[in-house]
Image: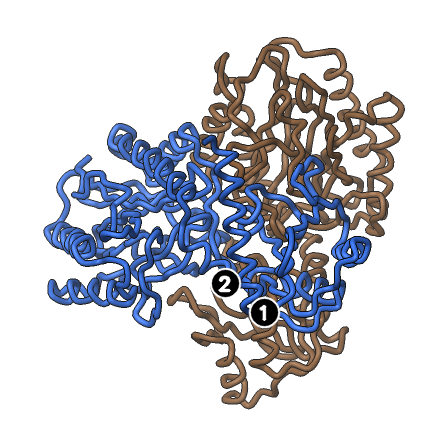
Chain colours: A blue, B brown
Amino acid sequence: MDYQTELNKDIKMRTARLQETVRCLGADACILSTSVNVFYTTGIIYAGYFYLPAEGEALHFVKRPSDVWLPNTVFIRKPEQIAEELQNRGLPLPTKVLLEADALSYNSCNRLIGALNIKETVDASPLLRKQRSVKTDLEISQVRICAERHMAVYGLIPSLYRHGMTDVALQAEIEREMLLHGSSGLFRTYGENMDVYQGSLLAGENAEEPSPFDFALGGKGVSPSLPIGACGAVIGKGQTIMVDLAGNYTPWMTDLSRVYSVGKTSDLALKAHQASIEIHNIARDTARVGTPCADLYNMAVDVTKKHGLEPYFMGTKQQAKFVGHGVGIEINEVPVLMPRSKDLLEENIVFALEPKYVIPGVGPVGIENTYLVTAGGIENLTPIEENIIEL
Amino acid sequence: MDYQTELNKDIKMRTARLQETVRCLGADACILSTSVNVFYTTGIIYAGYFYLPAEGEALHFVKRPSDVWLPNTVFIRKPEQIAEELQNRGLPLPTKVLLEADALSYNSCNRLIGALNIKETVDASPLLRKQRSVKTDLEISQVRICAERHMAVYGLIPSLYRHGMTDVALQAEIEREMLLHGSSGLFRTYGENMDVYQGSLLAGENAEEPSPFDFALGGKGVSPSLPIGACGAVIGKGQTIMVDLAGNYTPWMTDLSRVYSVGKTSDLALKAHQASIEIHNIARDTARVGTPCADLYNMAVDVTKKHGLEPYFMGTKQQAKFVGHGVGIEINEVPVLMPRSKDLLEENIVFALEPKYVIPGVGPVGIENTYLVTAGGIENLTPIEENIIEL
């Protein structure tokens, strides 16, 4: 079966599942307009509104591009035309509607509410995130292709490094290879102010810098308007370099971090790195369908405590409060592996596990892999060398 | 005066001006939380809320990073703590508040409204965009630095090209140079679903592809989840290549497009390119403080019609309805040079003019420069070779 045929089948399945949610909630329709959810429900991206009634076929209200060929496409300039078109088709205006209240602007939501005279809204954002967390066969095959390319690029990193390089210069070489391997360039993230582009490369003391963004680690960045990641410093002897650059080679992404060191690094760094591998090994041995995500977080904390590594866990001056997250069309999907999570692992969830440590004066250590939850446990989709690679 | 001293002076000025707007509107406070506006009003980026009362000093309610050193910084976990802190300080809760309704999510706005018991909101987004459009001396000096680096990278393009390259491969080489020249990597844009990262490189027939995004031109992209820009096709003989990659070398950006051709290109392409240069020349001769932005658009259309180039103007299958825009912390600031604009050019506005044409089977032509409106007219901040450069 070719990609387009399989995609059409997938889209039908995804739409049917979403429609079931609409009906379960006693709503009349779901309207989506973020790039991520339009792509998820249609297979393409358009500016406009994906309109899914509780029963019947989806309508595509499209502003741009001019060449959308989906069935039931209606070209519009403004959301008020949705109401007109529904009336033209003899369809009722929806009263209770699922809207992306977590992602769409206050003005955009209010404009839709006014244009369609909506009486009650339900937040579609977490419902879509939940649905997207369990991947279809097609999505999993896309994740696998992405993982292959992601690993291939990381395999080149030792050959791209030259002594005396800055962190930015190394990142420039890796990003060049990423683009040549089919990277889309964009790291889609969920949440307001999650500014990042191709992921991050952190070396030495820069790894300690707190960042305004809710990623696992920070970094100073090269501009006060984007304080995250590489900062332009020369990478010194004994320092570690963590590469956590985007696996955006297909629309379904992978997340992968590996660590390199300039010559031999410190014993503490090596010890902390081994603790991260130990956490991954325990997860690979114990995680299965039904495992609480909170358990994985707590296990990571236990291993960290056993080795006395708490001061370095997930940062020093600022410590992230999660050790992993779902991965898909957005890099930070649900479930989140955090202490208060109520989520359980489900079959076909794809998630990243990233227990990391920052060693002052040395740099970041620890690994990140992307895993698929299978009927039998979890499968590592990114199986490449896990030890620190000396450059 | 060093950057930080000048920045502090600038921030005071920007804040005072915004406070005047708050008072003029009879509001009690303005709350900002997008990266762009927090950066504009504080000089740094934090996750949290910039709280500016109608009178008195700004308060910074910060979630992350942990090391914010601004005066009046209060670390919080949730917006409800803003109300508590105001009460602790004996300050009244605001009744009428400016909120970023165009950029902040429906949920985030409603949460703020609930947390502070706000009775009336005013959309802060267009007010901030208007204020940001007129640049301060510091901002202009940042734009000038950015322009220098932007031009330096474009100067390298002929040396980066190799015959038989794909558009993506050429973009990879240019992006590598961008990062080495201090590019932040992120192209901040305004508006929902304006997905792009380092700008775009368009060659040959790909320039005709309509895109869902509201940029001047489209392109198929390399992924269905990011349908814009280069598509991986080999650049053929006689085709044109338009480079419109990000001028993000300081927080205040520049916009610059130049065209290259593989060998000699078609007469029609050369003619259309000259029309674009003619439009720039007329703008340079006639635009001044007080010129209506709509006049610049209409002038571009008139020149286009004079040369019979309407079918190619701003795209073929889908034609953008503007020929320029303000440039600053975001690449698409106000004013927009479009037919229905009511804006006039003001002193110290920085804007990009980009009359472009797409020639079927050949590629895109036309140039884009960034201009500063001065007391005497407009100054071209990006004065490099404007003719098509043969590769």
Q: Is residue B388 left or right of residue B342?
A: left
Task: Name the kind of residue labelled 1 in the image.
Answer: Val
Pointer 1 and pointer 2: residues touching (CB < 8 Å)?
Answer: yes
Task: For the N terminus of chain A, give its image quadrant.
Answer: top left
Task: Name the kind of residue labelled 2 in the image.
Answer: Leu
Asked if marks 1 and 2 fall on the same chain, the answer is: yes
Q: Where is residue A163? Give x, y as percent.
A: 24, 32
- According to the picture, the residue beneath numbered tag 1 turns out to be A122
Q: CA distance from mark 1 to mark 2?
A: 10 Å
Q: How many marks?
A: 2
- According to the picture, the residue beneath numbered tag 2 turns out to be A127
Label 1 vs 2, first from the N-terminus: 1
One can see residue B350 in this view: no
Please give the name of the residue rendered at 62% of the width and 61% of the height, measured from the top-left corner: A54
Q: Residues within 10 Å of mark 2 (few under 14, many from 20)?
A: some
Task: Tell me the subunit letter for badge 2.
Answer: A
